[in-house]
Image (spheres, rainbow, N blue to C red):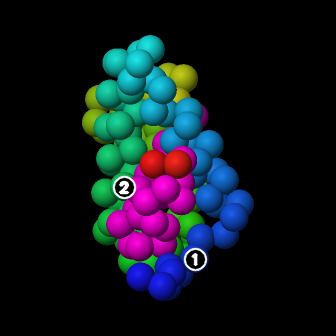
Amino acid sequence: MTGPADPIPAEALARFTAAEGRLYPLALVDSTGFEVATSLVGLVAAELRRDGADVASVLARRAELIDRVPRLAADAGLDPSGLPAEVVVDAASALRCRELGGVGPGAIGGA
């Protein structure tokens, strides 16, 4: 690959990195919180897979999805206490952008 077809703005990459940096360490210190976080990220990522066909559309849905996280959590029987909705959405957006080829391995969070 010569580079991403739909590059991600630096500001969004910074948000993605910060979100993943906040969520992943939960696995070591709060396994229940990590399970809730990964479930919520998965729910938001599923929303983005349905309606986020490219990086631009993923980024455009951020505000809407931040507003929807509490409802998605409630519908799934999850308690999102302590998990800011924007962190969940940014982590899900990072995942979806990877799937779309907008970022390569290592471009977010050093993974």
At label 1, which amino acid type do we have?
Pro
- Vertical placement of 79 versus 15: above or below? above
Q: Nearer the viewer, mark 1 or mark 2?
A: 1
- Vertical placement of 42 versus 38: above or below? below
Which residue in the protein does label 2 denote? 45
Which residue in the protein does label 1 denote? 7
Q: Is residue 71 left or right of residue 86?
A: left
Q: Is residue 65 visible?
A: no
The image quarter containing residue 30 is top left
Residue 35 lies, in percent from the top left, at 32, 28
Residue at 35% x, 66% y is 99
Residue at 44% x, 14% y is 29
Residue 61 lies, in percent from the top left, at 53, 64
Residue at 39% x, 77% y is 53
Mark 1 → mark 2, Cα distance in angstroms = 19 Å
Residue furthest out toward the right:
11
Quadrant of the snapshot with the N terminus: bottom left
The image quarter containing residue 95 is bottom left
Residue 3 lies, in percent from the top left, at 51, 81
- Of 74 and 2, nearer the camera is 2
Residue range corresponding to the magenta coloring: 84-109
- Vertical placement of 61 versus 72: above or below? below
Q: Is residue 21 in the magenta section? A: no
SS class, disc 1: loop
Is the C-beta separation of discs 1 and 2 under 8 Å? no
Residue at 45% x, 78% y is 54
Q: Is residue 85 in the magenta section? A: yes
At label 2, which amino acid type do we have?
Ala
